[in-house]
Amino acid sequence: MRTSAVRVGLVFPELLGTYGDRGNAVVLVERCRRRGIEADLIEVSAGSPIPVDLDIYLFGGGEDDAQVMAATGMRESGAAIASARSGGSVVFAVCAGFQLLGTTYEANDGEILDGLGLVDLATRAGDGRCIGECVVVPDAATGLPTLTGFENHGGRTTLGPGIAPLGRVTTGFGNGIDGCDGVLADHLLGTYLHGPVLPRNPALADHLLGWIVGPDALTPLDDHLVDALRAERLREAQLTGLAARRRDWHLNRG
Amino acid sequence: MTTDPENAQRHLTPRARAALALGGLAGRASKMTGRGAGTQVSGRVMLAVAPDLLADVARGRRVAIVSATNGKTTTTRLLADALRAAGLPVASNHTGANMPAGVAAALGREPDPEIAILEVDERWVPKVIDPLDADVLILGNLTRDQLDRFGEVRSIAERWRTVCDTHPDLTVIANASDPHVVWSVGGHPNVTWVALGAPWRSDAATCPECAALLTWSADSFRCDACGFAQPPADYRLDDNTLITPEGPLTLDLTLPGDWNRMNGALALTGAIVGFGIDPAVALTGLRAVDVVSGRFSDCRLPDGRDARVILAKNPAGWTEVLRWLEPRATAVVLAVNAHVADGRDPSWLWDVPYELLRGKAVAASGERALDVSVRLDYGGVDHLAEPDPLAAAARLTGDVDIVASYTQFTHLTRATW
Ligand SMILES: [Zn+2]
C-alpha cells in the first residue's frame, strides 16, 4: 500500500483540453478517493515546465496551433518525462496528445514535426476528418472490456513494427490505417477516443491506476450510472454501424 | 437621415415583390402546419424566387450587423430598442433567424423603417455584408460553439478578417477583450474598441497572429512573441458602468447577469458611435428591455406550474448561466441533447462547472441524460436522472429552472414561438 498521494498531472489544459479532457483527470482522482487512496489533481499550465514527480501524465486533445505549442513544451520537458517513465510513471494520451507521443506528426500546413518519441508511431494528415461514435475492442489478454468513445480527428496514425494497438475498431475509424485504435505499451496508453474516454470506460481508468497502485488496491466501485451510459452508447454505435453497413451494401449492389 | 421612409418599398422590383409575397405565403403555411415559426421557410422561398432579394430589401437603409458566438440576439434587441427610444424606426430580425434567408424575410416583413439592426450568424457575415451594403459592424466574441466543428473559431476569425480588410468604410465596434475579435478587426481604420472583460478564456490560449502562448493579466492579454496585444479601449465596461470618453454611464439593465451587461455595453456603444444617439436616451431603451426571445422562455409543467427555460449553447454559455443561477435557483433541470445543432459530442460537459449546483435539487435530463448524470456524479452533485425534462421538472419542488441545449430549448419552447 503506497503512503503518498497519487499525483495525476493534467498537462497544458489550456492547449490540450479541447474535448473535455479534464474529465479524464477528474475520474482518475475521484476513483482513487472513493477507494480511500489519496490523490491530487495537478495542473501544469502551458508555458511551465512539466514536473518529473507526477504519477500519471495526461495529454489531451487540441486544435492545430495549440498542438504545435504543446509539442514544443512537451519536447522541452522530454527529459523529465523520460525520467519519470523509468521510475514507473504512467503516460496516458488522447487524440492530439496521442499523436505527440510518437516520433513525428504532420501539422495542418503539411510540415512534419517531431513528437516526444516515447513510442514508435507516426501520424500523417488524412483526407477528411474522422468524426463520430467509435467502439474499440481490446485484446482479451488485456482484460479490458469493449471501449466506447467519440472521435474527431484528421490524423492517420501508423504503428511501428511490434507496437501493439489499444484494440480493434468495430465502429468508427481509430488510427484510420489498419482497423485498430491507439497504442498500448508498458505504462503507456494512447487513443483517439474522446467522450471523455475515462468517464465512459471506468475499467480503462482502473487499468491506468493499477499500474500505479497495484491491482489489489482497486476495490470494486458502484458504477451503475456509467454501466447504463456504456450500454446506451454501445447500442447507439451498433445502430450507426448497421446503418453504415446497409448503406455500403446498397452502394455495392447498385 | 434624409431617406424617405417609403424609399425601400417603392424601389422593389416586381420580382422582389413577388418573392416577398410568395415567401410570406410559405411562411404562414409552415406556421399553420406547426412546423415552426415559418421565418426560415419563407426566407428560403424568397431567395429562390429572387436571389438578389437581400440587396433589394436592404436598399436605402442604414444597416448594422451584429455578430458573435454568444449574445448576438440580445445585443441586437438592445441596440434596436436603444434606437427606437430615440424615435427612430427600426427593422430587425427579432426572432433570431440570422442566416441570409431569415434576414431577407425579416426585412421583407418590415419594408418601411430606414434603419435595419440585424443579427447575423458568425459564418454568414461575409456573405451578407455586400448585399446588405452594411454601414456598421458590431463584433462581440468568438468561442467554441459546436464542439465537433474542429477549427471553427479560427476559420470564422479568418472570414471576419477578410470582411474588415476589404471594407475600410465600415464603422466597426468590437470587443477589445477577445483575442480572436481583435485579430479579426486587424488594423481597420474606423474601429471603436469596447473592453468588455474576458470571463471565458479557454478558447483563446494561443496567439491568433503567431500561435505562441498568450499571456493574460487580470484584464488584458498580450503575446510576448509577436507583440499582438489587447488594443487600448475607447469604451470600457466596469461592473455596471460603461466608461466612455464623455464620462461614465450606469447601465442598470432589467435583463439579468454579467453577460447581459456585456451585451448592453456593446449595444450602447453601437447606439452612440454607430448612430449618434444621445446616451441618456439610448439607456432608457436598453433598460426597458425585459425579455429577449431566444435565451429565456417559460414552459408549462404537467402539474400547471410554470418553469423558466434558459438556453445554453456552448461551454461559455453554460458557465455564464450556472454562475447566474448559483445564488438564485433552488431546483434545476439540465436538459442536454447531442444533435448536430447541439454539438454531437457532449464531452464539453466536463468543461462546465456543474459543481456550482451542489446542494440544489438537480435533475439530469434530455436524450443525453446519462452523460449528464455521470458528469454530476463525479462532480459530487446529488441528482435524479429522467430523460423527459418536463417529467424531470415535475419531480422537483418549488420554482424550477430548466437549462437546455439548443434542440432541447427549441423543443420545450416551440409552443410559444
Ligand atoms: Zn503572437
Image (tube, coloured by chain):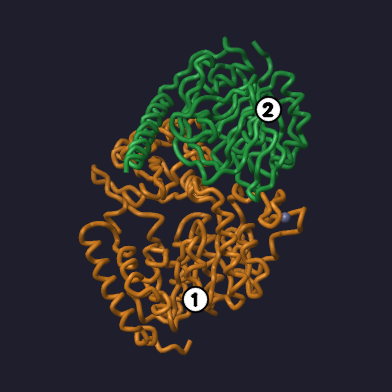
Is B240 placed above or below A202 here?
below
Q: Are marks 1 and 2 on the same chain?
A: no
Badge 1 sits on which subunit?
B
Closer to viewer: mark 1 or mark 2:
2
Chain that is coloured green in the picture: A
Nearest the camera: A93 or B116? A93
Colour assigned to chain B in the rendering is orange
Nearest the camera: B401 or A45? A45
Nearest the camera: A251 or B306? A251
Look at the image and tell me whether residue A32 can be seen: yes
Could you say where residue B49 lies in the image, as x and y percent from the top left? 32, 73
Could you say where residue B321 lies in the image, as x and y percent from the top left? 47, 48
Q: Quadrant of the N terminus of chain A?
A: top right
Look at the image and tell me whether residue B366 can be seen: no
Nearest the camera: B319 or B16? B16
Disc number for residue B281: 1
Q: Tag 1: residue type?
A: Val
Badge 2 sits on which subunit?
A
- Where's ligand 1: which quadrant? bottom right
Say which residue label 2 marks: A119
Crowding at mark 2 (Cα within 10 Å: few <14, some 14-19, many 20+)? some
